[in-house]
Image (cartoon, helix red, strand yellow):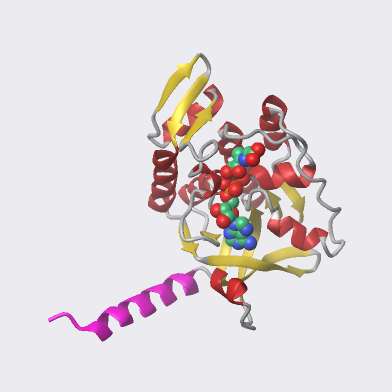
Amino acid sequence: MLDEAEISQVIIESFSQKLIAHLRNDVVIVGGGPSGLVLGERLARAGFRTALFESRLATGGGVWGGGMLMNQIVLQEEGMAIAREYGIRGTEHRPGYWAVDAVAMTAKLTAAAVDAGLVIFNGIEAEDVAVKNDRVDGIVINWSLVRTSTLPVDPLLVQSRITVDSTGHPSAVVNMLASRGIIPPARGEAPMNCEAGERMTVEHTGCVYPGLYVTGMAACGYHGSSRMGPIFGGMLLSGVKAAEAITRELRP
Ligand code: 48H
């Protein structure tokens, strides 16, 4: 006979164990879009204790919507080379332009990251950062539902040697420092220019303050790069670049 209280106990105990195991981390990634997932997969595979916090229920960020809710995305050859590592298939619909199913891309990036050992907490958001001795020391977390409910519920803190802002368009974590004058203000996304946007997003991926890195559209918005619409190679390459830079910092 199935016992209802046993089911509840399994959930409460196993979730608590998972969260307690990630109260101290090598790396915390905020946001589970394509750049955060690639970054998380690579860091977890390299053996770093890595957790990803995603405010929504599902990972994938802006991938799901494809272009104007047509759930296909485009990858250029460099992006496709990374996608293939995750078993993501594409069709070269026009020379140099690969069409990829948005659902398959999200599912495969997420599965690869989880298989590599990345622990994903969904429905939880970073509402603030901790700063100690002029260095980001971790994130302040709360259930995403708390913000929408407006209930006055105090958060918890998760420590991390490195925190990564992979929150996409809002550049949420860097703005937590910028709004207090700790780092310069975000420049905001420049108008659409796919070629420049893809290149600049990767160029601007990196450390913005001791202990804080930025990837993907968060890097684009913070540094004032052009936006690029539904082409995603730059996001995958940004995750790869951040993983390399963080690995160098943590394992000099
Ligand atoms: C926890 C949070 C918080 C928070 C936000 O937007 P994303 O897909 O991010 P990227 O940068 O990996 O990819 C960007 C791409 O999807 C895109 O939008 C492109 C290419 N646009 C081009 C254009 O011209 O418009 O994912 C970010 C994720 C989302 O799932 C959010 O829910 C999540 O971060 N998030 N999670 N705490 N405070 N804020």
Name the chief secondary structure element in magenta: helix
Q: Is residue 5 left or right of residue 252?
A: left
Check the picture and name the quadrant holding the N terminus: bottom left
The image quarter containing residue 178 is bottom right
Q: Is residue 249 left or right of residue 179?
A: left
Up-down relation of residue 64 to residue 12 (above or below)? above
Image label count: 0
The image quarter containing residue 234 is top right
Q: Nearer the viewer, residue 226 or 118?
A: 226
Is residue 3 shown in magenta? yes
Residue at 84% from the left image edge and 53% from the top image edge: 185
Q: Position of residue 107 (x, y in %)?
A: 40, 45
Q: Nearer the viewer, residue 215 or 93?
A: 93
Q: Position of residue 11 (x, y in %)?
A: 35, 76
Up-down relation of residue 130 to residue 53 (above or below)? below
Q: Nearer the viewer, residue 29 or 185?
A: 185
Is residue 90 shown in magenta? no
Q: Position of residue 179 (x, y in %)?
A: 82, 62
Up-down relation of residue 199 to residue 166 (above or below)? above
Which residues are drawn in magenta? 1-21
Q: Position of residue 86 (x, y in %)?
A: 41, 37
Inspect this view and state whether residue 28 appears: no
Inspect this view and state whether residue 197 appears: yes
Q: Is residue 138 left or right of residue 63?
A: right
Residue at 84% from the left image edge and 65% from the top image edge: 180
Residue at 63% from the left image edge and 53% from the top image edge: 167
Q: Nearer the viewer, residue 147 or 2?
A: 147
Q: Residue furthest left?
A: 1
Q: Residue furthest top?
A: 95
